Image: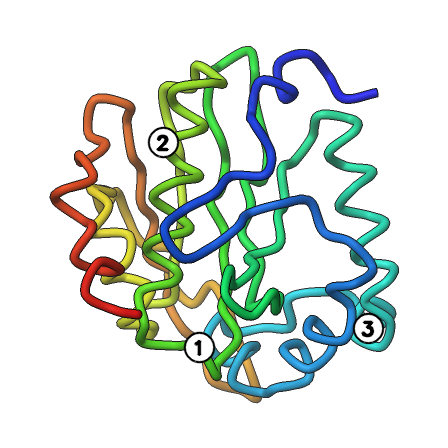
Amino acid sequence: MVPPRLAKVRLPIETPRLILRLPSRQDVPDLRRSLRDPRTAMAVGAPLHSKQEMRNPVAMVSRTRSEYRRGEHLSLSVVHRETGKCIGRIGLRGLSWTHQKVESLSYWIDPHFWNQGYATEASYFLCREAFERLGLRRIASQALDRNIASLRVLRKLGFVEEGRERAAVCVKGKCMDMVLFGLLRKEMRPANRVSSAWSRRS
């Protein structure tokens, strides 16, 4: 049974080009392909999931659905409406009902679908749902300082840079900073301020 508060989110969330829904086994082939693409991990700076989940995304699907039922996290598949393909994941990690906030908006898009505004589109509609239906007052997020595309997504949505975690992620002896962001409910930009990310793309 889903906790009453989290159940307020109307799933699936439909956007102009996407469907955001709970992960299912039908997503596994697409997830496996994305997770095995080294560009996916490079964008974040580290493997996104355990070795077991990298080998067998069914375990990831089971875990995220269990976290949803416990009210801990909301992790959704990003599905392309036209093709029905799962092209990524997006989620709200670390829900705190006491403080009405989320520790992290996290997302990734299959590299074959980069530079088409999908991350911005998915993030906008999930954040709007979180503020309007869950009554949250704050959503945090973060991105590697080298990940220009992700930094652009967050700034376009109205996220404010709040700090920097120096040498936060080290890969093959190279350390990178993590840029920390926060978005308050009153700072959420209206759709017409960000819709250019998806309205001019098919």
Q: Which mark is in front, 3 or 2?
A: 2
The residue wearing badge 1 is 113
Mark 3 or mark 1, which is nearer to you? 1
Between residue 152 and residue 179, name the one nearer to us. 152
According to the picture, the residue beneath numbered tag 3 turns out to be: 51
Mark 1: give few (<14), some (14-19) or many (20+) Cα within 10 Å.
few
Colouring mode (rainbow / by chain / secondary structure / one colour): rainbow
The x, y position of residue 96, in whole percent, is 56, 22
Q: Nearer the viewer, residue 68 or 27?
A: 27
Labels 3 & 2 near each other (Cβ < 8 A): no
Image disc number at residue 128: 2
| Quadrant assignment, res 38 | bottom right
* Closer-to-camera residue (34/142): 34
Amino acid type assigned to the residue bearing label 2 in the image: Arg
Residue 46, given in percent of the width and then of the height, sits at 58, 73
Whole-angstrom CA distance, mark 1 to mark 2, is 23 Å
* Secondary structure category for the residue under label 2: helix
User: Looking at the picture, how far across and down is residue 176, in whole percent?
Assistant: 40, 73
CA distance for labels 3 and 1: 24 Å
Q: Residue at x 38, y 66 (%)?
A: 144
Distance CA(mark 3)–CA(mark 2): 33 Å
Q: Residue at x 19, y 65 (%)?
A: 200
* Coordinates of residue 128 in the picture (x, y in percent): 36, 31
Disc 1 on helix, strand or loop?
A: helix
Mark 1 or mark 2: name the one nearer the start of the chain: 1
Q: Is 41 situated left or right of 187 in this image?
A: right
Above or below, 143 relative to 99: below
